[in-house]
Image (cartoon, rainbow, N blue to C red):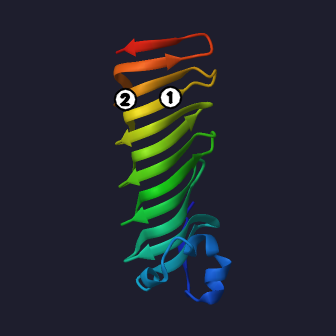
Amino acid sequence: MNSSIQIVTHPINTELKEKEYSFFKHIPDKNIIDLEFVEVFESSNLLYKGFIKNGNRYGYGKEFYENEGYYEGFFKDGLRHGQGTLFYHDGTTYSGSFEFDKFSGHGTYIVNKNKYIGNFQNNKFNGPGTYTYANGDIIKGSFINDFLEGYGTFISDRKSTRLNS
């Protein structure tokens, strides 16, 4: 099957700003001058809606992934960069800071009712964080590459224990 990409560019005017307020509220008027507001389709599926600059996703937008979910947040040079939320079809979410398409900085990651709140680097838990299991048990401490490093605290409704990894 041969599919084609269609880009619909919308003139930035007062009517568009009112209709698409959720996008424009994130971009100061003085910065809009270098941007275009577009919708990108493949066949009839919306792939991206938001701003572009020099042909790349830039500023605030929504990107849709076939059978995977979508991202809503900021882009820079075509990559997820800045604050945003990534929603997966299975219910997994990441909300927080992105740096050049990777989880980086502070964020919240939820998968299978387990939740990590803390720092990330290169898509991994890195730095201080709290991991809460679906059953309510909690691990607090410092993580390196997804693993607890050094001392931490394990908390449950049954007991609280100091951990050493």
Task: Say what amino acid the circle numbered 1 marks.
Answer: Tyr
The picture places residue 159, in percent across and down from the top left corner, at 56, 10
Quadrant of the image containing the N terminus: bottom right
Residue of label 2: 143
Q: Nearer the viewer, residue 77 or 136?
A: 136
- Residue at x 62% of width, y 22% of height: 136
Mark number displayed over residue 94: none
Q: Quadrant of residue 78?
A: bottom left
Amino acid at the residue labelled 2: Phe
| Residue at 60%, 48% in the rendered image | 67
User: With respect to residue 49, does 163 lie above or below?
Assistant: above
Res. 157 in view = yes
Q: Position of residue 96 (x, y in %)?
A: 48, 49
Question: Which quadrant would the C terminus be assigned to in this image?
Answer: top left
Q: Quadrant of residue 144?
A: top left
Q: Is residue 123 visible?
A: no
**Is disc 2 surrounded by few (<14), some (14 to 19) or many (20+) residues within 10 Å?**
many
Q: Residue at x 57, y 34 (%)?
A: 111
- Decide: few, some or many residues near mark 1? Use Cα within 10 Å; few <14, some 14-19, many ≥20: many
Is residue 78 or residue 129 the one in the foreground? 129
- Say whether residue 131 is left or right of residue 141: right
* Distance from the alpha carbon under mark 2 to that under mark 1: 10 Å
Circle 1 sits on which residue? 131
Residue depicted at x 63% and y 75%: 21
Q: Secondary structure at mark 1?
A: strand
The disc, 2 or 1, on the residue closer to the chain's N-terminal end is 1
Answer whether labels 2 and 1 touch (C-beta < 8 Å). Answer: yes
Percent position (x, y) of residue 127? 35, 35
In the rendering, at what x and y percent does residue 101 appear? 39, 53
Element at label 2: strand
